[in-house]
Amino acid sequence: MTETPNPNIVDADSLTGEMHPIRRVVVALGSNLGERLAALQGAVEALADTPDFFVTGISPVYETDPVDSPEEAGPFLNAVVLADTTLPAARLMERALAIEDAFERERSDIRNAPRTLDVDLIVVGDRRSNEDFLRLPHPRAHERAFVLQPWHDLEPDAVFPERGPIADLLEATDASGVRKREDLSLEVQ
């Protein structure tokens, strides 16, 4: 596991002297096409290889029923990655999209279509954004047990910005389609 930076310290760019606050990041991963576990593991490794992005936790893997997806959609494997970073939210979003592209994610006009990999920024510190390119905090994650349960496993006392404790949010969601896979795991290699 990568050493965690002190979240109370502000990082300074060694070339420009520009100050960058360290932010806590919650990233949700999902896959329901192809080699699902390999895609999630590849995403974890790609995130861990990102400069100035320090993975601090990886949740257990869950198999979940698709939510608001086409009928033919198969079950997802889902997990959550926690990290500390000095990267701006827009750069993190670009990185998330690049990782999806590397795993041949095909974008479709069909809402919640099956996919080889989904890399969603859920929370980036206290950053707020309502742009088409980047919505933070994630607008539906507080309603999704497949995000809340793995996040809760890592940080049971976490608070979803403007929504409240994730334990309370999880209790209010339907988690019947979320099953922990004890036989599967992800790690930074």
Image (cartoon, rainbow, N blue to C red):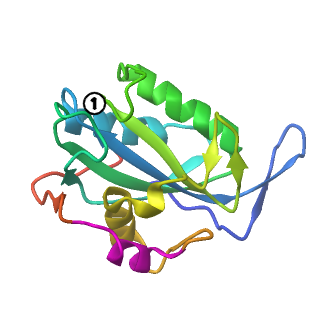
Does residue 6 appear in the picture of this structure?
A: yes
Residue range in magenta is: 164-175
Q: Where is residue 68 in the image (x, y as percent from the top left)?
A: 31, 44
Q: Is residue 166 inside the magenta stretch?
A: yes
Q: Where is residue 16 in the image (x, y as percent from the top left)?
A: 90, 39
Q: Is residue 89 left or right of residue 113?
A: right
In the figure, 149 relative to 12: above or below?
Answer: below
Q: In this view, does 148 lie to the left or right of 16?
A: left
Secondary structure at badge 1 equals loop
189 or 129: which is nearer to us? Answer: 129
Q: Position of residue 159 (x, y in %)?
A: 53, 74
Q: Quadrant of residue 127?
A: bottom right
Q: Is residue 183 left or right of residue 176?
A: left
Q: In this view, does 78 lie to the left or right of 97?
A: left
Q: How many marks?
A: 1
Taking the spot 44% from the left edge, 21% from the top edge, the residue there is 101
181 or 51: which is nearer to us? Answer: 181
Q: Position of residue 151 (x, y in %)?
A: 39, 64
Taking the spot 66% from the left edge, 67% from the top edge, the residue there is 7
In the figure, 35 relative to 126: above or below?
Answer: above
Taking the spot 64% from the left edge, 40% from the top edge, the residue there is 134
In the picture, the quarter occupied by the N terminus is bottom left
Q: Is residue 65 inside the magenta stretch?
A: no
The furthest residue to the right = 17
Other-residue count near label 1 (Cα within 10 Å), few / some / many at <14 / 14–19 / ≥20:
many
Amino acid bearing label 1: Pro
10 or 30: which is nearer to us? Answer: 30
Does residue 156 appear in the picture of this structure?
A: no
In the figure, 106 relative to 54: above or below?
Answer: above
Q: Quadrant of residue 66?
A: top left
In the picture, the quarter occupied by the C terminus is top left
Residue at the spot of label 1: 114
